[in-house]
Image (spheres, grey):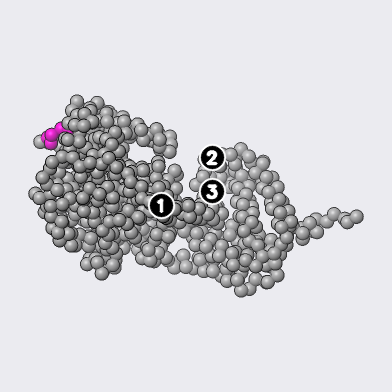
């Protein structure tokens, strides 16, 4: 009978390839998981009496990584697979550490939709040194120096025994701290998302499954099929919608910011909506979502890609739609529209270190005049405040706030430098929007003119240790979801600006954009009547659902209702009027309040 020996058991369970996988696991945990360790240490300070739980969690994530690598790494292919994991994890580890970003499905969408110019903006010497030292060097060693015998395939029995051993160790790790783990799983989802590379690989599998399941041959689904044009106005609409990029609500002086970032817009008769939330935290989600009728709760790329959007409806009703883009692209919104790319000097005549947003206005006079006697819708997609190199988003003449951060590595800059660079880019957006208004004023007598500016999402500038955007929506900070929206109306438009001003403090969202565009062109649809009646100014449209008439434009602007917005658990907004609304506003306020109640009941 053979004598039991621990050394024999060890040699049996820890083959050369398994030992190599453990070496890679420990390397990843030691050098590519700074963000995870940092978050766990903040939640459970080593000197705060919770060092045991902290060590248990670190061991748990180490075991998760080892189990995952054991499942996917076998035989000769392990050499290439582990080298790729070492390289990609170094990239992910650097950006999670420096910017607090999470590699989820939304971030993977952003990476694939990022153009070359944006990629260059994310590079830095610190990133290159980190990736070479932590990713490239070990990957090259794995490919060309690791002994060949390390890549002999283990038997399935040995792998199964080792995996079983690790599961037993994991249970032994979790069991003594089960209460702490229950709290961690329930309350700290964000920290788990920094596990590198396990969560990144989970997101990649999920992203691949989502996109492979989209049937590209699926027919385009028609929406709002009962849409009809109403009214008998003799003047045609001319609306310019500016889709902003990475703009924060709280950095507009129109909204109370202490720096004067909107000197030009403050001279115009505009309404700045104070309580607007985005559909997503990235351009790839927010832009197609805001033009879709799905709304945030129902939005998915699978549905939106094969469904008509607001621009399709306008085009079907003889509105000339033009999309001009100084960003990466329209994210699928303008695939069936006239589209012009203004990211290069070939089209954009206002370029220095990069092509500027204001260049998108060149040639619009000719376009408008060539469509005389027709309704026109123009969408201008900004470069705006796209980070992290905010200092590149504006010409030198707009560098009013100094000193500024001139690095893509925001952690190397002071908070003041980051804020100043970001605020200067907002100052340039103010100039751009004022130029859009000046263009529209030239057609104020011949058209019903309007400008609507809505940002796609916000930006984290260091709050809570986060930078940039694209955080998962359910845990995203308000800096990424509270966005600016500004409206200017010409003197011929159905609305007057003072009829809209009472709603500037009302909770709105990207969900409102679809029906806002339809009603701006006097298009009636049951899709919009029931929940968006306050948007409908045309008297013919308002007569059908028996809505009270909007007040005539007063001599003095209407004072906005005093609204207190209280955040409830789960992110819902509760609205309370300090004073009851005036009688002439009661009907309109009742209609829009129903919208808020409906949204509150379905919000996550």
Q: Mark 2 points at which residue?
A: 186
In the image: residue 595, left or right of residue 167: left
Q: How far apart are marks 3 and 1 (CA)?
A: 36 Å
Secondary structure mostly seen in the magenta stretch: loop
In the image: residue 151, left or right of residue 234: right
Do the numbered discs 2 and 1 sit on residues whose CB atoms are within 8 Å? Answer: no
Give the SS element for disc 3: helix
Front-lying residue, 179 or 483: 483
Do the numbered discs 3 and 2 sit on residues whose CB atoms are within 8 Å? Answer: no
The magenta-colored residue range is 550-554
Using a 10 Å C-alpha cutoff, classify the residue at mark 3 as few (fewer than 14 neighbours), some (14 to 19) or many (20 or more): some
Residue 543 in picture, x, y percent from top left: 19, 31
Q: Mark 3 points at which residue?
A: 192
Using a 10 Å C-alpha cutoff, classify the residue at mark 1 as few (fewer than 14 neighbours), some (14 to 19) or many (20 or more): few
Q: Compare marks 2 and 1 and give the one earlier in the sequence.
A: 2
Q: Is residue 385 above or below residue 494?
A: below
> In front of the other: label 2 or label 1?
1
Q: Mark 1 points at which residue?
A: 218
Quadrant the N terminus occupies:
bottom right
Q: Which residue is drawn at 29% across and 33% down?
A: 530
């Amino acid at each position: 009978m053979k004598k039991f020996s621990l050394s024999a058991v060890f040699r049996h369970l820890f083959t050369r390839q398994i030992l190599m996988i453990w070496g890679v696991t420990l390397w990843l945990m030691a050098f590519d998981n700074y963000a995870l360790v940092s978050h766990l240490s903040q939640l459970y300070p080593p000197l705060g009496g919770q060092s045991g739980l902290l060590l248990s969690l670190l061991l748990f994530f180490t075991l998760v990584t080892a189990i995952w690598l054991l499942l996917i790494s076998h035989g000769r292919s392990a050499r290439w697979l582990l080298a790729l994991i070492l390289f990609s994890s170094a990239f992910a580890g650097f950006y999670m550490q420096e910017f607090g970003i999470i590699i989820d499905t939304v971030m993977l969408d952003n990476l694939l939709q990022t153009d070359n110019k944006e990629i260059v903006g994310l590079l830095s010497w610190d990133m290159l040194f980190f990736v070479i030292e932590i990713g490239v060097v070990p990957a090259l060693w794995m490919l060309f120096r690791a002994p060949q015998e390390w890549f002999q395939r283990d038997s399935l029995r040995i792998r199964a025994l080792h995996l079983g051993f690790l599961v037993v160790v994991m249970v032994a790790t979790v069991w003594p701290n089960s209460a702490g783990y229950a709290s961690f799983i329930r309350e700290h989802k964000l920290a788990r998302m920094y596990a590198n590379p396990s969560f990144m690989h989970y997101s990649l599998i999920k992203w691949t499954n989502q996109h492979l399941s989209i049937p590209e041959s699926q027919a385009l689904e028609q929406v709002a099929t009962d849409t009809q044009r109403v009214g008998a106005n003799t003047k045609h609409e001319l609306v310019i919608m500016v889709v902003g990029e990475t703009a924060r609500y709280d950095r507009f002086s129109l909204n109370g910011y202490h720096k004067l970032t909107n000197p030009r817009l403050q001279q115009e008769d505009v309404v700045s909506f104070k309580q607007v939330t985005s559909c997503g935290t990235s351009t790839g989600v927010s832009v197609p979502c805001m033009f879709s009728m799905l709304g945030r709760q129902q939005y998915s790329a699978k549905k939106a890609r094969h469904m008509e959007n607001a621009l399709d409806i306008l085009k079907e009703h003889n509105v000339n739609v033009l999309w001009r883009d100084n960003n990466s692209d329209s994210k699928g919104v303008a695939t069936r529209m006239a589209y012009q790319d203004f990211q290069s000097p070939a089209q954009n005549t206002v370029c220095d270190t990069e092509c500027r947003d204001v260049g998108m206005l060149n040639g619009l006079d000719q376009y408008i005049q060539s469509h005389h006697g027709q309704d026109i819708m123009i969408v201008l997609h900004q470069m705006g405040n796209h980070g992290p190199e905010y200092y590149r988003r504006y010409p030198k003449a707009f560098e009013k706030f100094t000193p500024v951060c001139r690095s893509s590595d925001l952690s190397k800059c002071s908070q003041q430098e980051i804020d100043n660079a970001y605020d200067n880019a907002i100052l340039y957006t103010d100039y751009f929007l004022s130029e859009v208004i000046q263009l529209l004023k030239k057609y104020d007598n011949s058209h019903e003119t309007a400008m609507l500016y809505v940002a796609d999402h916000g930006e984290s500038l260091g709050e809570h240790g986060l930078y940039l955007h694209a955080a998962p929506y359910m845990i995203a900070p308000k800096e990424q979801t509270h966005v600016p929206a500004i409206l200017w109306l010409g003197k011929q438009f159905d609305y007057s600006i003072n009829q809209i001003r009472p709603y500037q403090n009302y909770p709105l969202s990207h969900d409102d954009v679809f029906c806002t565009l339809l009603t701006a062109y006097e298009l009636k649809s049951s899709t919009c009547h029931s929940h968006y009646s306050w948007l409908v100014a045309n008297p013919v449209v308002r007569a059908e659902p028996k809505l009270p008439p909007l007040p005539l434009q007063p001599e003095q602007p209407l004072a906005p209702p005093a609204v207190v917005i209280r955040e409830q658990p789960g992110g819902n907004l509760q609205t309370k009027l300090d004073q009851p609304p005036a009688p002439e506003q009661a009907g309109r306020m009742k209609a829009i309040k129903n919208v808020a109640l409906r949204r509150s009941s379905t919000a996550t």
